[in-house]
Image (tube, helix red, strand yellow):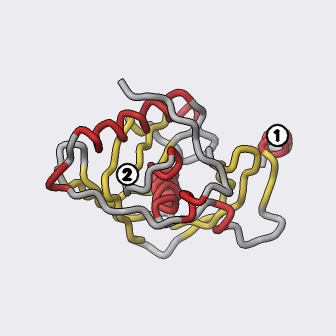
Amino acid sequence: MGKIIKVREVGNPVLNKISEEVDITNINNDILDIIDDLKATLEDGVGLGIAAPQIGISKRIIVVGAKKENVRYNDAEDIPLTAMINPKWEKSANDTDIQFEACLSVPSIAGKVERFKKINLQYYNEQGEKIEREIHGFFARLIQHECDHLDGFTLLNRVTDKAGFATKENRKKYNL
């Protein structure tokens, strides 16, 4: 059972660093403990994904998981709680869309971010097995968002329109 860890917020230097790759040939108890802590922290909060830097650890690990009914995106699907070690993605089509995103590390602001609609995803699971698949829609957006954390970015770095921010309260109030 993992520990619930306080999520680091913008301004914390760990969120601006490029995270270190995990040695896939040595997925030890330390790595599995990080994954358990990420899962516990995600399940305790309101997020749909979390990256290791958000709990203060500069390793290339993310955990995602979402119930379709809890997601505001039209093309959302159920995503089982999944740990991804050394995730990488590349676009599989040029189509993009711009939607509001929220972030556990940016607690009171949502921002309009452009993301690719379809990506090819590659990662390793907790047993060190390589997984490759094409994903689209909300799931693709979530992966791109969480991988940004591994490269030292938050959604604040991705908003290009100065009018592209809203408080979470206004986003709900005006259905943005």
Q: Position of residue 169 (x, y in %)?
A: 82, 40
Which residue extends farthest left? 25
Relative to residue 61, is residue 37 depicted above or below? above
Q: Quadrant of residue 58?
A: bottom left
Tell me the residue at 62%/67% (across/down).
114
What is the secondary structure assignment of the residue under circle 2? strand
Q: Pick the residue in front: 146 or 71.
A: 146
Tell me the residue at 25%/47% (across/down).
125
Determine whether label 1 and label 2 are within 8 Å by CB.
no
Q: Pick the residue in front: 1 or 173.
A: 1
Tell me the residue at 41%/49% (across/down).
62
Residue on which disc 2 sits: 61
Q: Position of residue 24 (x, y in %)?
A: 20, 56
Q: Amino acid at mark 1?
A: Glu
Which residue extends farthest top? 1
Residue 67 showing in the rendered view: no
Q: Position of residue 144 (x, y in %)?
A: 49, 60
Q: Amino acid at mark 2?
A: Ile
Image check: 143 left or right of 100? left
In primary-sequence order, the first of circles 1 and 2 is: 2
The numbered mark at residue 169 is 1
Q: Pick the residue in front: 41 or 76.
A: 41
